[in-house]
């Protein structure tokens, strides 16, 4: 065990030492590190799978097939490790999906939620090259059906399941664009759906889905690759060091996705047709804090809020979480501007639920974890891009002796972080 710990320590030391020196930056370092990651934005058409579902007709269980849907999706991400990895978040535009309901159904849809994933390219992305990839992603699939003769006040419930489909595909790089085609395989292909408050029916989902996408990448650090700029960066570093301004205040903003990780016992015991539904959604992530350069440590506060609405049959439940969090996290190493970090959080959580008009709420403190990475080519920058994940185990609202869970896994893929005052300091330095 001790030997393994020493090996890990030496690896971290080597990666840090290989990345940069403490006080100066060489042209080779800047050239290599600025090619490490590229920002991407994209659009894709996703082919949702179809399947078969059960329904009641005259008290008897019947079966019906349903087709898939075409869903446009938007993606924000980053190519990392010099074209060998793609980390991304994809947002489906389900409100404009193209689908055809089978006869007798007012609603019958299978859809997927926000997708977070990674694709690995053994043959790196390069202009004029066709590069195969394998990937894995995490999202929720959602299933909902409603017969034309059904007359439920709140419509049909939604079945949700966290899935991790495997992906294989090809990407062609042309100029600043990537063109990709891929297939997803989902091993979870069966479920039981609540077709009445007391009756479930079997649903089979085709395991394969397909995607065609185009996205553009930006080499945002291209302008740093010159000997003149490297000399300027070294002067900036010495200036910040001499003025004791390597420590800096910062603020940050970015989009974040949240998904509930465990199920709510309150729903299981009171509204079993909502038990498979998970709260979560898309939310803004705001942060403010202090970066301490020597220990490479951040101490900050963040605020996020996320709400959701669960409906089915005669039930409507609205939930909302407000989180004000203190965060302390330390960088593990700096490898050519790729700076992963790990830390702890302490937060004040205001949780509330509206259950068919009846209000429940609680304010509590909580302890959680934060991890992620910065893309930080040098310590002289006035801004950087940050990725972070947060999780508070067992965060819940107690209602009638049972739990409504708020233990969201929060994934903030792209957060813009600005160091306050550095630009003005550099203007003073130039004078």
Image (cartoon, rainbow, N blue to C red):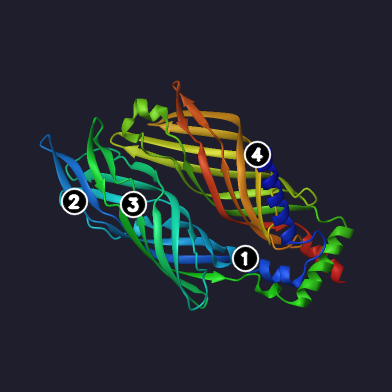
Which one is earlier in the sequence, the residue at label 4 or at label 1? 1
Q: CA distance from mark 4 to mark 1?
A: 28 Å
Placement of the N terminus among the 4 image quadrants: top right
Q: CA distance from mark 1 to mark 3?
A: 34 Å
Frontmost of labels 1 and 3 is: 1
On the image, numbered disc 2 is attached to which residue? 65
Residue 392 horizontal/vertical position (percent)? 56, 36
Frontmost of labels 4 and 1 is: 1
On the image, numbered disc 4 is attached to which residue? 344
Q: CA distance from mark 1 to mark 2?
A: 47 Å
Quarter of the image for residue 37 reads: bottom right
Q: CA distance from mark 3 to mark 4?
A: 35 Å
On the image, numbered disc 1 is attached to which residue? 36
- Tell me whether the residue at label 1 lies in contact with that at label 3, contact meaning CB atoms closer than 8 angstroms: no
Residue 177 horizontal/vertical position (percent)? 49, 74
Quarter of the image for residue 421 reads: bottom right
List the single residue furthest toward the top.
401
């Amino acid at each position: 065990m001790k030997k393994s710990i020493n090996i890990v320590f030496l690896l971290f030391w080597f990666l840090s030492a290989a990345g940069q020196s403490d006080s100066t930056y060489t042209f080779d370092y800047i050239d290599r590190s600025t090619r490490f990651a590229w920002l991407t934005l994209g659009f894709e058409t996703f082919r949702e799978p179809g399947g078969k579902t059960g329904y009641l007709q005259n008290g008897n269980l019947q079966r019906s097939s349903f087709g898939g849907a075409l869903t446009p999706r938007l993606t924000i991400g980053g190519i990392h490790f010099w074209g060998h990895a793609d980390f991304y978040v994809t947002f489906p535009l389900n409100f404009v999906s193209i689908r055809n309901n089978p006869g007798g159904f007012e609603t019958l849809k299978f859809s997927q939620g926000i997708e977070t994933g990674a694709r690995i390219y053994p043959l790196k992305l390069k202009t004029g090259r066709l590069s195969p990839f394998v990937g894995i992603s995490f999202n929720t699939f959602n299933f909902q059906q409603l017969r034309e003769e059904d007359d439920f006040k709140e419509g049909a419930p939604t079945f949700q399941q966290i899935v991790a489909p495997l992906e294989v595909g090809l990407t062609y790089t042309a100029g600043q664009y990537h063109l990709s085609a891929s297939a997803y395989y989902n091993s979870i292909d069966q479920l039981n759906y609540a077709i009445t408050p007391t009756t479930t029916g079997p649903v089979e989902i085709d395991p394969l889905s397909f995607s065609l996408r185009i996205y553009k990448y930006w080499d945002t650090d291209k302008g740093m690759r010159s000997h003149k700029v490297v000399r300027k960066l070294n002067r900036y570093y010495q200036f910040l060091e001499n003025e004791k301004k390597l420590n800096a205040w910062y603020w940050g903003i970015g989009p974040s996705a949240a998904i509930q990780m465990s199920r709510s016992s309150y729903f299981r015991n009171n509204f079993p047709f909502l038990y498979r539904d998970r709260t979560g959604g898309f939310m803004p992530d705001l942060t403010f804090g202090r970066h301490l350069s020597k220990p490479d440590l951040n101490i900050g506060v963040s605020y996020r809020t996320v709400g959701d609405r669960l409906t089915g049959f005669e039930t409507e439940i609205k939930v909302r979480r407000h989180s004000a969090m203190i965060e302390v996290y330390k960088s593990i190493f700096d490898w050519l501007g790729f700076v992963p970090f790990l830390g702890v959080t302490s937060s004040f959580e205001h949780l509330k639920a509206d259950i068919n008009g009846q209000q429940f709420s609680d304010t509590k403190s909580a302890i959680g974890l934060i991890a992620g990475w910065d893309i930080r080519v040098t310590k002289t920058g006035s801004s950087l891009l940050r990725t972070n994940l947060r999780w508070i185990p067992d965060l819940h609202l107690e209602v009638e002796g049972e739990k409504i869970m708020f233990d969201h896994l929060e994934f903030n893929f792209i957060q813009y972080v600005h160091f306050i005052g550095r630009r003005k300091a550099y203007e003073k330095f130039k004078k």
